[in-house]
Amino acid sequence: MDVKAISKYVRISPLKARDVAREIQGLPVSAALSLLNFTPKKAAVLFTKTLKSAVANAEHNFSLEANNLIVKSAVANLGPVHKRMKPLAKGSSAAIRKPMSHLQVIVSDEKPQPKKKDKTAKKPAAAATAAAAE
């Protein structure tokens, strides 16, 4: 079962948060929390809060064990952008963008299925090569 937690309007750029999100995907919750604990980035602290919220949702709402959960996905989506102006010389100005993010973490108690290679796609090419050789 998939359980989701979302942190909205977090003051960090989604580009900076996605680096941390990629690191925790597919890990067990305990490993993801320990990795986030030793990651020296602001996004790590924010994803830690969101991940703990998702685990709490799974335990309280669906009676799932925290030891059996894995991080199915971690996403940092673009939120609204605060637009400010900085005065420059001769009456001109420059735009300052202060982006926000929506952080989403999905935990699951199901083991991820390994992707199987599609062997049927290679067979026609091999058959065509064998027919050409004859």
Image (spheres, rainbow, N blue to C red):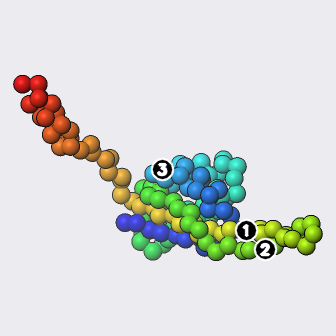
Which residue is outermost to the right?
A: 90
- Where residue 102 appears, x then y in whole percent? 59, 69
Q: CA distance from mark 3 to mark 2?
A: 39 Å
Residue type at numbered disc 1: Arg
Amino acid type at image mark 3: Leu
> Which residue is most to the top?
134
Residue 31 spot, x, y in % from top left = 53, 48
Distance between the alpha carbons at the discs numbered 1 and 2: 6 Å
Position of the C terminus by quadrant: top left
- Quadrant for residue 88, please give it: bottom right
Mark closer to the chain start, 3 or 1: 3
Tell me which amino acid carries mark 2.
Arg
Mark closest to the chain's N terminus, 1 or 2 = 2
Horizontal arrangement in the rendering, residue 32 relative to residue 40 (left or right): left
Q: Which residue is mark 3?
A: 27
Q: Is residue 68 above or below residue 57?
A: above
Q: Which residue is mark 2?
A: 84
- Place of residue 127 in the rendered image (x, y in percent of width and height, measured from the top left): 12, 34
User: Which secondary structure, mark 2?
Assistant: strand
* Residue at mark 3 to residue at mark 1: CA–CA distance: 33 Å
Q: Which residue is mark 1?
A: 97
Residue depicted at 66% across the width and 48% down the height? 39
